[in-house]
Image (tube, rainbow, N blue to C red):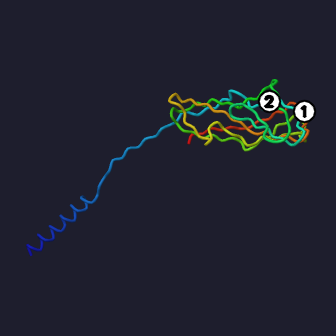
Amino acid sequence: MKKLILIFAAIVMVAGFSANVMAQTETNTVGAKILTAMTIQETAPMHFGTMTVPTTLATVVLATDGSVSVGSGTITLLAQAPTSTAAAYDITGDFNATYAITIDASTTITNGTPAEDMTVDNFVCSYAGLTSTLSAGGLDAFTVGATLNLANAQPAGTYAGTFDVTVAYN
């Protein structure tokens, strides 16, 4: 009987110790990083410059460096004011952070007569992948160009419109 009690006591002790041996605790770290709010500021508006009334359907392509060219059709681009400028933007935010750029697919510019509206589309950014990284100082800049679509004999006038450019951290 004494042996039986010793065996039983040994089993209870082993069971108690083995439960402690199998349970493990790991202390983990936790943290968070709050990024500075991004800002975007237009430093130059987009303008396709001055041109003649087209004699066919035409497109005018504005490159990200501000230069313009005839994409298709018959139209003459002029060097008189206002001249062409690509839209330009300054970005601020958290240093060395990556961000994405989103640009409207198209927009309409008008001279006040809806039947004479023109479409601006094929927006292009100086960052081909529409992403960039802010500098060590939290700064960056980029430009945007697009294509202007003109009707045959597009009426003369001054046309204006808007489009959206959005920046957001990746």
Determine the image quadrant of residue 16. Answer: bottom left
Give the residue at the far top of this rendering. 81
Counting from the top left corner in percent of width and height, residue 65 is at 68, 31
Residue sitting nearer the eye, 162 or 154: 154
Of callouts 1 and 2, which one flags the residue occurring earlier in the amino acid sequence?
A: 2
Badge 1: few (under 14), some or many (20 or more) residues near its Cα, within 10 Å? few
Residue sitting nearer the eye, 129 or 170: 129
| Residue 49: image tag | 2
Q: Is residue 52 left or right of residue 65?
A: right
* Residue ID for mark 1: 156
Residue name at image x 57 percent, y 37 percent? 132
Q: Which amino acid is tagged 2?
A: Gly
- Where's the N terminus, which quadrant? bottom left
Counting from the top left corner in percent of width and height, residue 76 is at 84, 33
Counting from the top left corner in percent of width and height, residue 166 is at 66, 38
Q: CA distance from mark 1 to mark 2?
A: 13 Å
